[in-house]
Image: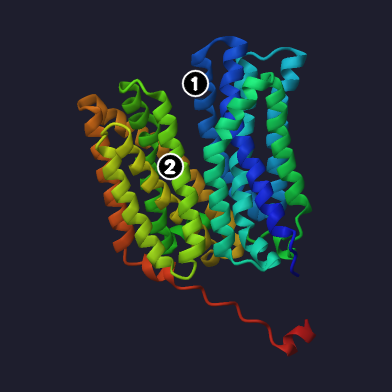
Amino acid sequence: MNSKATLPLYLTATATSLFGNAAIAIVLPWLVLERTGNPALAATVAAVSALPAAISAFVGGHLIDKVGRRRMSVLADLGSAASVAGLAIVDAAVGLDAFWFIALGILGALFDVPGMTARETLLANVSETSGVTLDRIAALRGMIFGLSFLAGPALAGWLLTMLDSVDVIWITAGCSLAAAVLIGLMPLVPSALAPSEDTSVLAGFTLVFGTPALKAMLIISLASMVVVGPLLAIILPAHFTALASPGQLGLTLSAYAVGSMVGSGLYGLLFGNRRWAAWVVSNLLYAVGGVLVATLDGFWLVAVGMTVAGIASGLMQPLTTVVMTERIPDALRGRVFGAYSAASMMANPVGLGLMALILSAGTLQTGAWAMALGWAIVSAYAIVAPSLRGYVEAAPEPEKEPDADHQTAG
């Protein structure tokens, strides 16, 4: 089976869903402030959504394998659309208050991450159906991620200047609905519809901790989140606040997004058959970017550092997706990807807490250099970990096709 429609439908569904997520991140706090005038409530809605999102990432990974990845992707996007549309419906019916904002915020968080994970686990099926290599699809997907990070919030902000916030809510819900329809219509090989016969909830963790390379990749993922979270949430905002330049903060984050698009493009063009080289280059760029940012020298050097870090991310994201897709058994892919997502989301508050301790005893510059040192340690470990090179570099052995006698006998 080879369908030319599969890849465009998959990429369009990814783009619409990511835009919906980027838009609601802007529109929901805006709507909270419009209806209540309470900034603390806006922060509370974001905070209370974090834990349910981490739990749903783990549980969603299990459900992806249990009910089938395409079905789970569609159900998650429909649930996300319903939770967002619920804001507009409740607002028109009884009026939004703190209870409804928190309840619907939690409901939306329960669907977003499983939907993203389900689409990620569909990569192999999209490749098999379309005839396009995993490396190329992952690179295109990485470029869409970078574009959504760059343009999504800006477009959502522009819509808020042109339309009523409730109208933008309906557009956001429509994005999730469109993603569900596109994935539902997408031609796929039958295996994408089949649930796993192994329903053990902890099977993903068992595989990860029983495979040295997967365990090393998990450590790298967690440590990276511990470093990156404080960079985006504390160090950069504090630096540009001190400079009284919020516009430059936006440009610096845009530089990271552009860098990630460039990195994903470079992976697709140059590194598809040179994965270990991409791994080493990415980790070296992470370390260099961290040092440049840690100087906190005005705008340009910090922006260049974020661009370099973005290129590193753009190389790393498709690479790890491809390697894990190829090496993790099909029946366990949802649970392993879900476990990684859940663990990474839980690492973010750890990083914020550690940075708070560092800043309580030192300056912002101290915190920035601690971030750079952490990034350098993670990068060095990623390059020298003994189990990783063979795992990243070598393609898995293809499954043997059954011989003619077995085919006719079955």
Q: Is residue 378 left or right of residue 172?
A: left
Q: Which mark is residue 43?
A: 1
Tell me if residue 83 can be seen. Answer: no
> Relative to 292, is 282 above or below?
below
Residue sitting at x 70%, y 12%: 95
> For the residue marked with disc 2, what is the amino acid?
Tyr
| Residue lying at the far bottom of the rendered structure | 405
Tell me if residue 43 can be seen. Answer: yes
Q: Tell me the quarter of the picture where residue 81 sits.
A: top right
**Is disc 1 surrounded by few (<14), some (14 to 19) or many (20+) residues within 10 Å?**
few
**Is disc 2 surrounded by few (<14), some (14 to 19) or many (20+) residues within 10 Å?**
many
Q: Position of residue 248 (x, y in %)?
A: 39, 29
Q: Which mark is residue 256?
A: 2
Q: Position of residue 89 (x, y in %)?
A: 75, 21
> Relative to 257, is 172 above or below?
above
Q: Is residue 39 left or right of residue 34?
A: left
Which of these two is toward me, 322 or 194? 322
Considering only order in the chain, which callout, 2 or 1, is on the residue closer to the N terminus?
A: 1
> For the residue marked with disc 1, what is the amino acid?
Ala
> Relative to 198, is 375 above or below?
above
Q: Position of residue 91 (x, y in %)?
A: 72, 16
Which of these two is toward me, 291 or 63? 291
Q: Is residue 247 left or right of residue 304?
A: right
Tag 1 near tag 2, CB within 8 Å: no
| Residue lying at the far top of the rendered structure | 37
Residue sitting at x 77%, y 50%: 184
Which of these two is toward me, 308 or 95? 308
| Residue lying at the far front of the rendered structure | 300
Mark 2 element type: helix
Quarter holding the N terminus is: bottom right
Compute the Cα span from label 1 to label 2.
25 Å
